Amino acid sequence: MATESHRYVWQRDDWPLFTWRSDEILDLLGKCRLAQGRLLCRISDLGLSLDTQAHADIVVEETITTSGIEGEQLDVRSVRSSVARKLGLPSADHYVDRHVEGVVSVVLDATMNHDEPLTVERLQGWHAGLFPTGYSGIHQIRVGAWRGDQPMRVVSGPIGKERIHFEAPPAERIGQEMDHFLDWWHSSKGNIEGLVRAAVCHFWFVTIHPFEDGNGRIARALTDMAFAQDDGQRQRYFSMSSQIMRERNSYYDILEASQKGTCDITQWLVWFLECFSRAIENSEKVLSGITAKAAFWRRHAQVSLSERQRKVINRLLDAGQGGFEGGLTTRKYASMTRVSKPTAYREISDLLKRGILRFNPGRGRSVSYDLVWPE
């Protein structure tokens, strides 16, 4: 139990010499590695080598959920467009949202360039990318630099009855704390079990809380970077942020409890590994969607389609079989592609002739369409 003088873990004399009880995490580690291996085998058996489109789908989910954990809702269409543009996919729109572009850039850089050195400049560049206007909501913040002298507290409750969940180290300690963290980051690679290293880095970074905002998003980017360094994959095949989003309340609870505890972070590691295991298990839905997409485009690889037709097809594929509410109609096609209804009707008719679209059953007065889904 922490004393008043050691209310937070970073105030302890042994900070940051983290320890854990190996006997309590060994079975969990085995379970995680088994689940990870099964997923990789399934990807291999399906012949799905995580091509560019598949990679894009996972990056989109990661981008949306890592911001959603902090209560920020990104426009899904803008995220898809940004990811497609950065990965060179033909489905990219021309509309650019600077904020979305920054979040996507951080997510991609952390995994695709995972072997590049992690430096103060790189971390501060990520932060600048998350806040391109210099504001977090309506509040101006220090961007691309460590936070200022104001105490950094995680607080809830109404004014006058606030509850302080956590207070980070004072600003004058940040430079030294981050130097220590970065030294550990480089020296620990290959010397600590990879999943444990990812968990330690996540906890350590959010405890230092070096920025005025965006610390959680950068911590999750670092976690993905640690995963990529562990498995050597430049593309993720599961989304840890999505699972944390599902378990957001327990995520904040275990962080608070651990930050008010000792440098024995066993309970944090247990929570993290269990969350990782569930993230792998829940990747099934994402993987099924990716598989359907890959099968569809393999079947129609030689078909010449316009950019507008590809855009609509990808929207239907993203929605999944039967998931596009009300089916595709001429009006919806015209709205998505910004063409006239006669043009939309001609392009839909072309897709019908090619066997890409079909009429939905029970048409009645309202005609709608769906993809001819592969078996």
Image: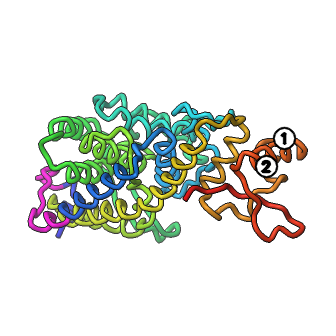
Q: Which amino acid does label 1 sit on?
A: Val
- Mark 2 closeness class: few <14, some 14–19, many ≥20 residues within 10 Å: many
In this view, the residue in front, 301 or 80, is 301
Q: Can you tell which mark lies on residue 246?
A: none
Instruction: Tell me if 315 is positioned left or right of 12 in this view.
Output: right
Identity of the residue drawn at 13% across and 63% down: 26
**Residue 235 quadrant:** top left
Q: Can you tell which mark lies on residue 339?
A: 1
Residue 34: x and y, percent?
A: 23, 60
In this view, the residue in front, 247 or 17, is 247
- Mark 1 closeness class: few <14, some 14–19, many ≥20 residues within 10 Å: some
Q: What is the spatial separation of the Cα atoms under label 2 and label 1, in whole angstroms?
A: 8 Å
Residue 197 is covered by the magenta coloring: no
Q: In which quarter of the image is the C terminus?
A: bottom right
**Residue 199 to residue 338: above or below:** below
Q: Judge whether residue 149 can be spotted in this image.
A: no
- Which type of secondary structure does the marked residue at label 2 adopt? helix
Identity of the residue drawn at 59% across and 48% down: 137
Residue 135: x and y, percent?
A: 56, 41
Q: Which amino acid does label 2 sit on?
A: Tyr
Instruction: Tell me if 237 is positioned left or right of 320 in this view.
Output: left
Identity of the residue drawn at 55% across and 35% down: 132
- Contact between marks 2 and 1 (CB within 8 A): the answer is yes
Q: Mark 2 points at which residue?
A: 333
In this view, the residue in front, 82 or 2, is 82
**Residue 186 to residue 241: above or below:** above
Instruction: Tell me if 213 is positioned left or right of 210 in this view.
Output: right
Counting residues from the start of the chain, the first of labels 2 and 1 encountered is 2
The residue segment tinted magenta is: 12-28
Instruction: Tell me if 98 is positioned left or right of 355 in this view.
Output: left
